[in-house]
Amino acid sequence: MKWKRGRSGDRNVIDIRGAKKGGASGGGGFGGMGGMSGGGLPIPSAKGKIGGFIGIVIVLIVIGTQVFGGSSGSGTGYDIGSILAGAGTVPGADNPSPIPASEDPDADLKDFSAYVFTDSQQVWRKAFRQDGQPWRDAQLVLYSGAVSTGGCGNATSAVGPFYCPADNRVYLDLSFYKDMKNQLGADGDFAWAYVIAHEMGHHVQNLGGIHDEVARARRQESESANEISVRNELQADCLAGVWASTVFNQLEPGDLDEAINASEAVGDDRLQSRGGGSVNPDSFTHGTSAQRHHWFQTGFESGDPEKCDTFSGDI
């Protein structure tokens, strides 16, 4: 993916990787990737701008209300698929002290992550404002090892990138870039971009009222809680694809392959198979590899968030 440096200075990008450790904490999230590659799926010849933004927030709220009804909320975080061990009691982080670029082995990855996050935010912010809908900026928190959130508990890097609706922040440990490559074979810069765009999709859902509806429905409909979670995650995949359509002119051969490969790599069926156990559809929380591929591609090919209705019909 072609990109420009300079967005790591965005006030919404918070780097606490050099923070001192201390205190105690608790709980969860996911993400990751690496490098450039060529070949693979052809990129469509006509893209570049999102379409169909009219009433995006209203559309998302209506979709959620039709399926779930009512309202109310919760502060649990959203991730794109737990891969490693879950988090337990972990050290928190305070006293942020950003690592100097000259001493930072992940300086390029940090800058790229900030670029994707900021670009995605600008796209969605513009869309909401054009529709006369309120927008609240998300923030990107880069941490190392463990982190305390503003309402979603605490997490270690083992749970990967995640979004916390309580504080409107996306949390990333850059080490997960290598974990995705080495453990899941999900390599490439646009695979990493897909992860960040997915988490920003959760922010769009949060502002659109979907998070509250999903949280309430999962509490009240325990038997279908996993299916509700799957539909929610697939919508975030679709919204990630919608953002990807806006950077079409920046894509290079193989980029789309990288994102699709990453979406398939974190499918519940693929993860359960890799874990050595049997595949149990009733336990799925994020969707199969085929479903995640389908909904990311739906968003990319349509460039239209109104096509991201994963809450009605067959997914």
Image (spheres, rainbow, N blue to C red):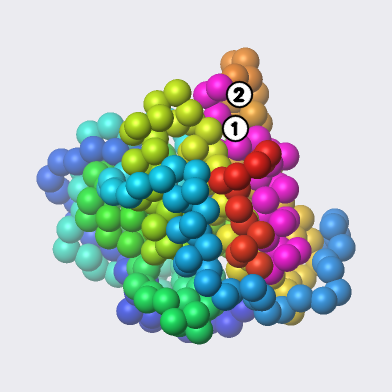
Q: Is residue 198 within the magenta segment? A: no
* Above-or-below relation of 93 to 98: above
Amino acid type at mark 1: Asp
Q: Residue at x 79, y 61 (%)?
A: 254
Q: Residue at x 52, y 72 (%)?
A: 55
Provide the residue span drawn in magenta. 282-303
Q: Earlier in the sequence, mark 1 or mark 2?
A: 1
Disc 1/disc 2 C-alpha distance (Å)? 8 Å
Disc 2 designates what residue? 281
Q: Residue at x 44, y 43 (%)?
A: 68
Residue 281 image-quadrant placement: top right
Total tally of numbered discs in the picture: 2
Hey, which residue is sitting farthest left in the picture? 23
Whether residue 273 sits left or right of residue 57 in the image: it is right
Which mark identifies residue 201? none
* Above-or-below relation of 263 to 43: above
Residue 166: where, in percent of width, then height? 27, 55
Secondary structure beneath label 2: helix
Label 2 CA crowd tier, 10 Å (few <14, some 14–19, many 20+) = some
Disc 1 designates what residue? 268
Q: Is the Cβ of the residue at disc 1 closer than 8 Å to that at disc 2?
A: yes
Whether residue 141 sits left or right of residue 301 in the image: it is left
Q: Is residue 295 within the magenta segment? A: yes
**Quadrant in the picture for the C terminus:** top right
Residue 2: where, in percent of width, then height? 67, 77
Hey, which residue is sitting farthest top in the picture? 278
Whether residue 94 sits left or right of residue 205 in the image: it is left
Q: Main secondary structure of the magenta part?
A: helix
Label 1 CA crowd tier, 10 Å (few <14, some 14–19, many 20+) = many
